Image (cartoon, grey):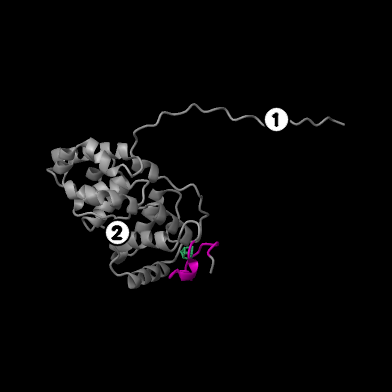
Amino acid sequence: MAKITHKPAPRKAAMPKKKAKAAKPESVKSKPTKKSFKAVKPWTPAEVREVFTRFQKANPEPRGELEHVNPFTLLVAVVLSAQATDAGVNKATRELFKVADTPQKMLDLGEERLRDYIKTIGLYRTKAKNVIALSAKVLSDFGGEVPRTRAEIESLPGAGRKTANVVLNMAFGEHTMAVDTHVFRVGNRTGLAPGKTPLEVELGLEKVIPSEFMLHAHHWLILHGRYTCLARKPRCEVCLINDLCRWPEKTV
Ligand code: SF4
């Protein structure tokens, strides 16, 4: 009889530690969440309409939770919100925006003092650098006004696709769809717009949501994910779309 020998499991080669890069914080956040979502059957157009009709009835004028006083402070708040909570950002920007609510005032404040205002927010050093650089660029290239096109907003330091979508939607009323972790989860779980990446979900949502709901769709979905369809323990029992939701693990 052949002797069975057990080979020790091969050890994983030790990976050399990478030096931390001063990358765009948003680029990290916009990756899909670790959890992989099983594709569920997408909703029919009639079901999508029904879902948004219910969201609209429950909350006709949904508001974003990032505090701001003009398009520039909105842009700054969104850049600061990468991998941070809106509440945490608001706590810091409440004081910051009292002294720096324009690109010029932000430059006058300077990077060091800006860091002091935002030091409670994750990645604050990189973000301070980006906010100063974007303020300079808004002044030099766009006459001190936040630009109105996606390409121009994405050209600003620290701003990516999600930032552009939020600013275009909230400041300029465009029908864009910013996909954060909440929208990504809700889009996948429910069957509204399943996708493996935030971009897939974004394009899927834009395709299926009727245009009359698009202005507020981003906020309805974020608020739904933040307060009802929670990542770990979704509150399916109080969910207003629980009869339509396709998630096999829903609890009702
Ligand atoms: S039923 Fe549950 S899983 Fe489905 S959308 Fe509502 S809260 Fe989320």
Task: Give coordinates of residue 78: x percent, y percent.
Answer: 29, 49
Q: Which amino acid does label 2 sit on?
A: Gly
Look at the image and say whether residue 249 sits in the magenta stretch: yes
Q: Is residue 64 visible?
A: yes
Q: Is residue 101 visible?
A: no
In the rendered structure, the answer to whether residue 202 lies left or right of residue 251 reads: left
Task: Give coordinates of residue 235: x percent, y percent.
Answer: 48, 65
Vertical order, 36 against 104 (above or below): below
Res 2 quadrant in image? top right
Sequence-first disc among 1 and 2: 1
Task: Give coordinates of residue 134: x percent, y percent.
Answer: 22, 40
Residues drawn in magenta: 234-250
Question: Which residue is painted at 43% across and 58% down in the image?
Answer: 187
Is label 1's Cβ within 8 Å of ligand 1? no
- State the predominant SS element of the stretch in magenta: loop
Look at the image and say whether residue 146 sits in the magenta stretch: no
Disc ID at residue 166 = none
* Circle 1 residue: 8
In the rendered structure, the answer to whether residue 32 lies left or right of residue 60 reads: right
State if disc 2 and disc 1 touch (CB < 8 Å): no
Task: Give coordinates of residue 200: x percent, y percent.
Answer: 40, 50
Question: Which residue is painted at 46% across and 70% down in the image?
Answer: 238
For disc 2, the neighbor class at 10 Å (few under 14, some 14 to 19, many from 20) is: some
Secondary structure beneath label 1: loop
Disc ID at residue 64 = 2
Alpha-carbon distance for marks 1 and 2?
54 Å
Furthest toward the left, the residue is: 143
Is label 2's Cβ within 8 Å of ligand 1? no
